[in-house]
Every structure is written in structure tokens, then in C-alpha cells.
Amino acid sequence: MNALVTGGTGFFGSHLIEELRERGESVRALVRPTSNQTLVQRFGAEPVEGDLEDLDSLRRACDGCRVVYHCAARVEIVGTPAQFEQTTVAGTERLLAAAAEAGVQRFVYVSSCGVYHPALFASGQEINEFTPVRVPPRWFIYGRAKYRAECSVRAQCPTPMQWTIVRLGYLYGPRNRTMHTYLEPAMRDRTMRIIGDGQNEMAFVYVRDAARAVAAAGRRPQAVGQVLIAGGNEHVTQQQYFDTLADGFGIPRVTKRVPYWVAFFFGWLGEYLVRSGPRRAVLRRAAIALTGLPQHLRCDHTQKLLDWRPEVKFADGMKTAFQWYHAEYD
């Protein structure tokens, strides 16, 4: 068995499995007992039941694998620090230990550009693979957990196992179920607002382009010990994003605007008052920061190192995403 993919039934993990299988690699996918394994099996991966909280199941999953692609994490923007710690941080540490015991050669940690402090985005500066990172604020629970998991990978990956970290930009494309869970309901009930003037750049990357980068990171010796960024090359604004979503959903475009700090205040308020429904993900300070702040990400080093380029244009990728979306939910 060449590769183990965690989170293989999820949005990004399923595309990574598809990419690896198309390159002829044998793939095993860690799946929870309650997960739907149909997609994993359709792509020709071997499902193995397990959980990031179960060390024995992780040992079985890693057995005989050359490389581990660790995509699984708590990806919801809502949750308690303890929930994120248990899954994203402690789960990564357990998987590192299991992979080392199994003799895995390469550990590729799929991280997020959410590890960058919102103040860094707010400054408007360009961010690349060598930009210093400091721990995100306590209210950005997701980014804080991914940052801590990265630290664990660097500190606890034992020799001779080698590590690579790939930070993904703002993913979009088919199989993104948050479009149905959060985005469309929030836009239909007019919760959504354009934050600021809507002209801030957002760091979008098509999911299959990101999967190609991560797959390449697991193959190339040059990627060992590197922190990389898989981002896009286009300048897509917040306004363009919401216009494209509205057109795809077949609903009126978002026209109401709110200043960033007003939205941030209501995000803080929502964390205490909104506990259920689609608004619980929209009315969060983390969601406001990721949507309303400029994200000037550049990944020239990654592109050169991996001989990789993002290929899918935003308009084409969103068209593909909505073709899947309407086939799935209509």
C-alpha cells in the first residue's frame, strides 16, 4: 500500500484520493464507522475503519503505507476549544505516533492558511511561504488548532520519518457541502452582507488544483521539511465571490454592506447568542475575518518546488461546483 489518506470521505480528502488513484497509486482511506464509504470505494481506495481518537485503529491504517496524507480535522468553524484540541491537535499527534511505529517514510500534513493571524491579513501585506507565523487569537479556534497541529508535526515527527506541511487557500469546487449547509440558507434569508466595500482579495484555489499540489508534495524529495502554500493565481474579490454564489443559487445578489468592525462586533455577539442553524457559522468573528480581510497570498516558492501551477479559473471552477451542487441537491 503506497498511501494512507485521512479525511477521505470529506471535501478535500475525496479529491486527493481521486488524484492519487489517477496517478496509479494504491490508496487506503481512514473512515469512521458511521461514514459513507461509497465515494472512497468508487475511486478504488481501500476503506479502513478507524478514528483519530483510537490509536490502535490508526496503527492498523498506517501498516504497510509509505506516505500518510493527513487531511482529517475538525473543519467546522463552530465548536469548543476542547473539541478542536481533541480532533485536530491530539488526533494529529496520535497519527504521528502510529505512522512512526508503522515505518511510514513521509508524513504530509494538510494545513490551512487560516493559521495566519488576522492582524497579518488586516495589515494588507503579501504573505508567502516564509512569512513568520504567530499563534492566532483565541476566538479563531479553527486556525489556532491548525497552528498547534503544525507545531506538533514539526516537533514530534521522529527520524527517519520526514514531514511536509501544505497550507491550503480558500477551497472551492464540487463536493463542498457547506454551500448547502451554511451558504445558501444564509443568503436566502438575507443574513449575508458584503463586509466593507467587498473589494478585498480572497485566496481561492480550486480543490483539484490543491489536491495536485498535496499529491506532489508527497512524492518530491525537495518538499521534505518544507512549509508550502497551495493557493490560486487569480485576484478574486469578496464581491465577485458572493455574486457568483447568488447567481449559482438562482437568488438575488447580496447588495447590503456593513463596515468590517460592525460585522466583527455582530460576529462576537453571534458566538454567544446563535447556537444553531446556518447563521451559527456566518455570525462568528472567524468567518468575518476570513471573508472581510484582504488575503494577499503568494506561493511562487511552492509552484517552483513542486513544478505545479493552479490551472482552473475561478469562473470555470465555480461552474463545475454548481453543476455538482444542482445534481446533488435538486
Image (tube, helix red, strand yellow):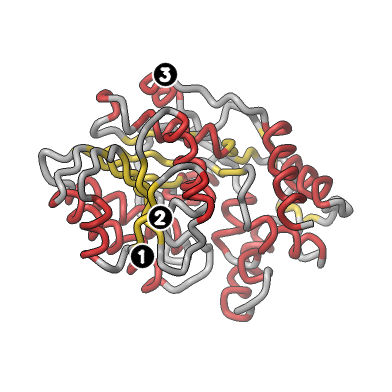
Quick one: SS at disc 1? helix
Cβ–Cβ under 8 Å for marks 1 and 2: yes
Crowd rating for badge 2 (residues with CA inside 10 Å; few <14, some 14–19, many 20+): many
> Which circle marks residue 87 in the picture?
1
Q: Quadrant of residue 143?
A: bottom left
Quick one: SS at disc 3? loop
The amino acid type, in three-letter code, at marker 1 is: Thr
Q: Position of residue 15 (x, y in %)?
A: 51, 41
Nearer to the camera, 327 or 229: 327
The amino acid type, in three-letter code, at marker 3 is: Asp
Nearer to the camera, 287 or 187: 187
Nearer to the camera, 116 or 48: 48
Mark 2 vs mark 3, CA separation in Å: 26 Å
Q: Which residue is mark 2?
A: 72
Q: Return the disc, 2 or 3, that comes first in the chain's sequence.
A: 2
Q: Is residue 36 left or right of residue 291?
A: left
Q: Which residue is mark 3?
A: 307
| Residue lying at 63% horizontally and 51% vertically, measured from the top left | 291
Crowd rating for badge 3 (residues with CA inside 10 Å; few <14, some 14–19, many 20+): few
| Circle count | 3
Mark 1 vs mark 3, CA separation in Å: 33 Å
Quick one: SS at disc 2? loop
Q: Position of residue 207 (x, y in %)?
A: 55, 39
The amino acid type, in three-letter code, at marker 2 is: Ala
Cβ–Cβ under 8 Å for marks 2 and 3: no
Crowd rating for badge 1 (residues with CA inside 10 Å; few <14, some 14–19, many 20+): many
- In the displayed structure, 201 sits above or below 112; it is above
Question: Do we see residue 119 in this rendering?
Answer: no
